[in-house]
Amino acid sequence: MNSMDPLYSKKEKLFDRLSEYKFLAVAYSGGVDSTLLLAAAKEASAGKVLALTAVSSLQPRWEIDEAVKLAGYLGVDHEIIRTAELSVPEFTANSPDRCYVCKKIIFSDMISRCRDLGFSNLAHGANVDDMADYRPGLKAAEEMEVLAPLKETGFTKQDIRSLSRQMSLPNWNKPAAACLASRIPYGMEITRQRLEMVETAENVLMALGFSGFRVRHLGDTARIEVRPADFSRLIRPEPRLRIIRELRNAGFTYVTLDLEGYASGRLNRSLFP
């Protein structure tokens, strides 16, 4: 990497920052952001680094499996933290501050585990671009003093992907992910059944080779969001009929395609018309 490259300077600042911590735990989902943070912490730290992954009905099973595999690839200690968001009415009510409630639950459990193991600091993968979206979970992280080294050192999402590629991290180009609750509109109760319906529906699209998509749960209707470039492939007779059949088997009555295409945070539009 050229020392004149702005990314070089950000990397140096990040590694210097991470080297300050002798016992650092990372809230690790297996996504691009937290994977880079974990890999950088392992390389920069002179002490111990621990990956903590929250597991509940909110995460697809394949995502957890990939996180476990990748943590092994990175050679870091890794623990699963089982959380119980669905037992908390403030979360299942699915108000616009749902993510705040969720992060409070997750980070509380992680911080408790950190204390048990003697880790004094917990970090997560928030970055500069996250500040431009509606992210109430960031407020929870700040209140609980969870570190955000990527944000503090000026990393954007593109910076994270670029450095991940340079560091040969296998998921550098993985599509952005979010918990399954993000597919359920605010105000609709979050239930295990609805989460399972979404997971089943998205597994169908994944099995057909699609990436960068969402299936929104709109009561009796599944609204599919894929990239516009994938429209023609999705509506070919064979995949279209398979999607309809399997999504109806999952519990949906109607299956629709969003002509606008996939975009992250679409359900936040109801908050900011």
Image (spheres, rainbow, N blue to C red):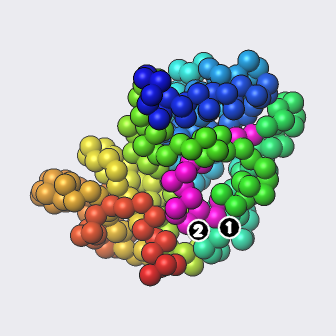
Determine the image quadrant of residue 149. top right
Q: Where does residue 50 sit, x and y in percent of width and height?
A: 71, 29
- Circles 2 and 1: CB atoms closer than 8 Å: yes
Q: Quadrant of residue 186?
A: bottom right
User: Is 25 on the left-hand or right-hand side of 69?
Assistant: right
Q: Is residue 124 magenta?
A: yes
Image quarter of residue 94: bottom right
Q: Residues within 10 Å of mark 1 (few under 14, many from 20)?
A: many
If you read the primary sequence from the N terminus, does the residue marked by circle 2 or circle 1 appear first? 1
Looking at the picture, which amino acid does disc 1 mark?
Phe
User: Can you say whether 231 is above or below 13 in the image?
Assistant: below
Instruction: Return the residue found at the far bottom.
Output: 273
Quadrant for the C terminus in the image: bottom left
Q: Against 64, is 2 above or below?
A: above
In this image, 125 relative to 160: left or right? right
Q: Quadrant of the N terminus?
A: top left
Residue 74 against residue 158 in the figure, above or below: above
Q: Residue at x 70, y 40 (%)?
A: 123
Task: Determine if residue 54 is in view.
Answer: no
Label 2, on which residue? 190
Viewer-proximal residue among 33 and 202: 33
Image location (x, y in percent) of residue 198? 44, 59
Furthest residue toward front? 4
The tag on residue 91 is 1
100 or 79: which is nearer to us?
Answer: 100
240 magenta-colored: no
Q: What span is colored magenta in the figure?
A: 122-137
Q: Where is residue 17 drawn, in percent x and y?
A: 69, 32
Distance between the alpha carbons at the discs numbered 2 and 1: 8 Å
Q: Residue at x 34, y 55 (%)?
A: 213
Q: Secondary structure at mark 2?
A: loop
